[in-house]
Image (cartoon, rainbow, N blue to C red):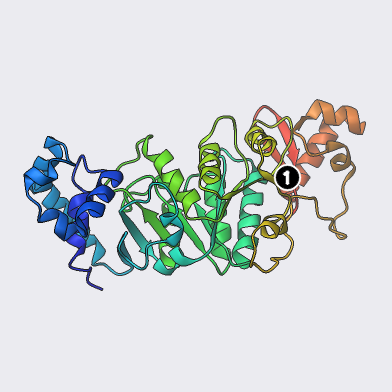
Amino acid sequence: MRPDPGLAGWLQLSLTPGIGASTLRSLLGKFGLPEAVLARGPRELAQYLSAPALESLASQAVQESTRRALEWASAEDHHIVTLADGSYPRALLETADPPAVLYAHGRLQLLQHPAIAVVGSRNATAQGSANAEQFARALSAAGLTIVSGLALGIDAAAHRGGLAGPSSTIAVLGTGIDVVYPQRNAELAAEISRRGLVLSEFPLGTAAVSHNFPRRNRLISGLARGCLVVEAALPSGSLITAKLAAEQGRDVFAIPGSIHSPLSKGCHELIKTGAKLVESAEDVLAELSGFKQSGRASTAEPRDAAQPVSALLAVMGHDPVDVDFLCERAGLSAEQVASQLLRLELEGRVTALPGGLYQRLEKP
């Protein structure tokens, strides 16, 4: 599909250095659509634009950037959505700073689906990643598109869970849409562009720079009806997303964890300050009207009759512990404990942590 001819004006304004989203919206409010803005003389525009921005507006560099963006948008499943488009996500229009232009690759209709943000630590534990994927799969099955940021750890697990359900997933980038970051998630990003949607407000070629990611976070929360934080340290980008969600009037949910885990501190802080403690997808759905129950997706330990809890697991609890602690509590030798831990790791019931610690896992 060829891009709308009026798109060039939107791109020219949005790609001009010195014209941010707020300034662009002011210009549109004063003069109308971009064609009308660009038809104004320099003297009139000077009331709204700095001298460098006025000089750049018709520069060769901006014209070339506009041409490249139009060429990108002409490819299959590539879209550039403006504030004037019917496909612009209604949820973002409710926020204080909606981007004037969005670059999208994949299933554009997902922008109109009800959604939930699922975010958390890049350095996730095995249990945290399992929880994120499990919750996301159940919430996708219940009719919520999963929105996250394509980071390592919890984000990646949430995207995988979203893809496993019918409502799929949206990955919101802190880079240009043609830049994959982190590179380790390149295969996942490609899969999302085929079966979900990849989204960015940043111009093509924008590299990964730190100040763009907090801006990206406001879109993650803004697209969603609520924000679920799975694991988060203090401080963290996930807490920024949760704070933005609260400011945007979205529900905030948090999964509790061990009091000894640094990655539980952020969730516990959110719960103390008003976030809803959740142990299952049903806890989330209960707060959001209009969604069918999804089936079990709980952080509580399921019982498998074919696989009884071992004596070692019985004394292990759910907090990280070392071998000496297990020897003392179970009355076993170090060799016996090591042998049982190896078997439990192979069964996916225990995970090894840094510092010689081990932690019990929920069996999916």
| 294 or 30: nearer the viewer | 30
* Residue at disc 1, secondary structure: helix
| 166 or 343: nearer the viewer | 166
Tell me if residue 32 comes above or below residue 203 in the rendering.
Answer: below
Amino acid residing under circle 1: Glu
- Residue 204 in view (yes/no): no
Residue drawn at (47%, 55%) of the image: 223
Residue drawn at (33%, 56%) of the image: 102
| 181 or 14: nearer the viewer | 14
Tell me if residue 51 comes above or below residue 283 in the rendering.
Answer: above
Name of the residue lying farthest toward the right: 331
Residue 177 in the figure: left or right of residue 259 = left
Q: Quadrant of the C terminus?
A: bottom right
Looking at the rendering, which quadrant does residue 277 occupy?
A: top right
Q: Position of residue 123 (x, y in %)?
A: 56, 37
Residue indicated by mark 1: 345
Q: Quadrant of the N terminus?
A: bottom left
Residue 85 in the figure: left or right of residue 142 = left
Looking at the rendering, which quadrant does residue 246 occupy?
A: top right
Q: Position of residue 203 (x, y in %)?
A: 27, 49
Q: Position of residue 236 (x, y in %)?
A: 53, 34
Looking at the rendering, which quadrant does residue 315 occupy?
A: top right
Residue 296 in the figure: left or right of residue 234 = right
Tell me if residue 348 comes above or below residue 291 in the rendering.
Answer: above
